[in-house]
Image (cartoon, rainbow, N blue to C red):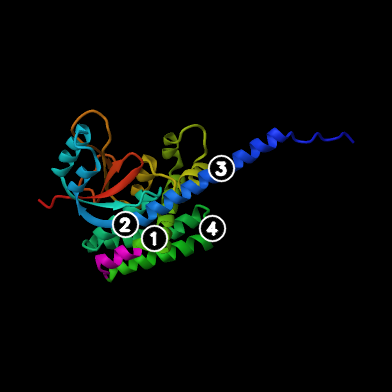
Amino acid sequence: MAEVDEVPGEVKELNSDKAAQDEAIIAQQDRIEKEIAECTPLIGDKEELCILRQEYAEDDQIYQQKIRDLMTQYSHIRKTRGDGNCFFRGFGFAYLEYLLQDKKEFARFKDIAAKSKDMLVALGFPQFTIEDFHDTFMDVVHCVEKPVSLTELMSKFRDQGLSDYLVVYLRLLTSGQLQKEHTFFQSFVEGDVPMKEFCHQEVEPMARESDHIHIIALTHALGVKVRVEYMDHAEGSKINHHDFPEGSTNPVVTFLYRPGHYDILYCNKS
């Protein structure tokens, strides 16, 4: 049998250094996530929109002008934790908050939510897993029906375990809709990645950021109108928005999108 050469000491040292670097990076990421969790609730309090001015330098004319434009249409903002789940968590809270005041819309949504489990199981999702998340989701839906107070609803979304269950179910609904209408949605996916694989990689896992395809699928699944206001450093003083579904009006949930993050917006009452 041929002798196996011993790994040179320099290679061992390089591997050891790389492992130490990887551990340091992971530790740093954990510290950053912990700091974010300590200073930012999963769902924040409702605040006056003018607080955005303090987040950008006074001489940053592009952002300051866009904030002024935003304030002509919106009065308040509710921030969400930037953990990769901000769209789904923000949507869940903002929509249920809206449903506290709209009984007709609630009845429509409750019917869709109740039937959604069977749709997911029919698509091949494991029934035992789906039932667990669906039951928890429907428990919160029934609480809204009572109705609960806004403070109670907020406490549910600030409970990490419960809140994450709700996010998971919204992700599963989105995945189900994408797979159900895979022919339509396939053109949104880059490359030749099959829709089921795309969902396993980019939709169902926690902390995966949301893009247009996620929003389109979820609004289709639940029949909910959503508007996203985009604020970035592109030239101009006006905010651009996109409505989901395309061309819809009178959204029931509105987000402010800044690169990589969604917060909830509230319209001026006038």
Q: Residues within 10 Å of mark 2 (few under 14, many from 20)?
A: many
The numbered disc on residue 163 is 1
Residue, disc 4: 126
Q: Look at discs 1 and 4 and give the one toward the viewer.
A: 1
Estimate the spatial distance between the alpha carbons at disc 3 and disc 2, rounded to whole Å.
32 Å
Q: Is 150 above or below relative to 2?
A: below
Element under label 3?
helix
Side of 74 where 139 appears, left or right: right
Image coords of residue 57 (percent x, y)? 23, 37
> Depth check: 29 or 48 in front?
29
Q: Residues within 10 Å of mark 3 (few under 14, many from 20)?
A: few
Side of 171 where 155 appears, left or right: left
Q: Look at discs 3 and 2 and give the one toward the viewer.
A: 3
Element under label 4?
loop
Among the two numbered marks 3 and 1 on one chain, the one whose residue lies closer to the N terminus: 3
The reply to whether the C-beta atoms of the residues labelled 1 and 2 are less than 8 Å apart is yes
Q: Which residues are magenta?
A: 147-156
Q: Look at discs 1 and 2 and give the one toward the viewer.
A: 2
Q: Look at discs 3 and 1 and give the one toward the viewer.
A: 3
Q: Amino acid at mark 2?
A: Ile
Among the two numbered marks 4 and 3 on one chain, the one whose residue lies closer to the N terminus: 3
Give the quarter of the image for residue 39: bottom left
Residue, disc 3: 22
Q: Look at discs 4 and 3 and give the one toward the viewer.
A: 3
Image coords of residue 239 (percent x, y)? 21, 36
Estimate the spatial distance between the alpha carbons at disc 1 and disc 2, rounded to whole Å.
10 Å
Estimate the spatial distance between the alpha carbons at disc 4 and disc 3, rounded to whole Å.
35 Å
